[in-house]
Image (tube, rainbow, N blue to C red):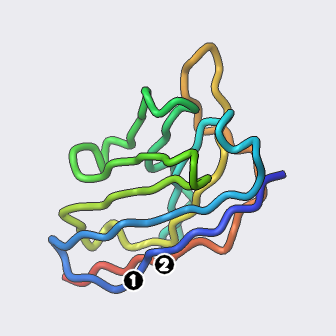
Amino acid sequence: QVQLVESGGGLIQAGGSLRLSCAASGRIFRNYAMGWFRQAPGKEREFVAGINYSGERTKYADSVKGRFTISRDDAKNAVYLQMNNLKPEDTAVYYCNRVVTRNTVLTTTTIDSWGQGTQVIVSS
């Protein structure tokens, strides 16, 4: 298992930007696709964005396309989520995790236990 630590959340007004970071332990980080997920109060956890092991392929939930960008820095064992034009409905706890790739296609199937997450609150 890889240990994952999310950070960068906070309270922000609608229309603002935040950059979330996910630090992963272990040398195997660079061999895996990574994903960001979120869970709003009273809702199921949902997929937000994913990036393959090389960074060449990304995938986004329709609700964040054009506003969020996922990236990775394997030298730092880190994956990031740049969130622009935030909306109140983006309010949630955000988590990262390794995700399964099947025939080069990113899936939303996670591999590791969930970390603590980082809270994002967007005020209107």
Q: Residue at x 32, y 41 (%)?
A: 62
Task: Identify the amino acid type marked 2.
Answer: Gln
Tell me where residue 94 appears, x and y as whole percent: 51, 66
CA gap between label 2 and label 1 equals 6 Å
Tell me where residue 92 appears, x and y as whole percent: 45, 71
Between residues 64 and 78, which one lies in front from this camera angle?
A: 78
Q: Is residue 21 left or right of residue 13?
A: right
Between residues 84 and 42, which one lies in front from this camera angle?
A: 84
Q: Are marks 2 and 1 in contact (CB under 8 Å)?
A: yes
Q: Is residue 102 left or right of residue 120?
A: right
Q: Residue at x 31, y 68 (%)?
A: 89
Q: Residues within 10 Å of mark 1 (few under 14, many from 20)?
A: some
Task: Identify the amino acid type marked 1.
Answer: Gly
Residue under label 1: 10
Image quarter in which the C terminus is found: bottom left
Residue under label 2: 119
Instruction: Specify the label residue 75 is tagged with.
Output: none
Q: Secondary structure at mark 1?
A: strand
The total number of labels drawn is: 2
Q: Secondary structure at mark 2?
A: strand
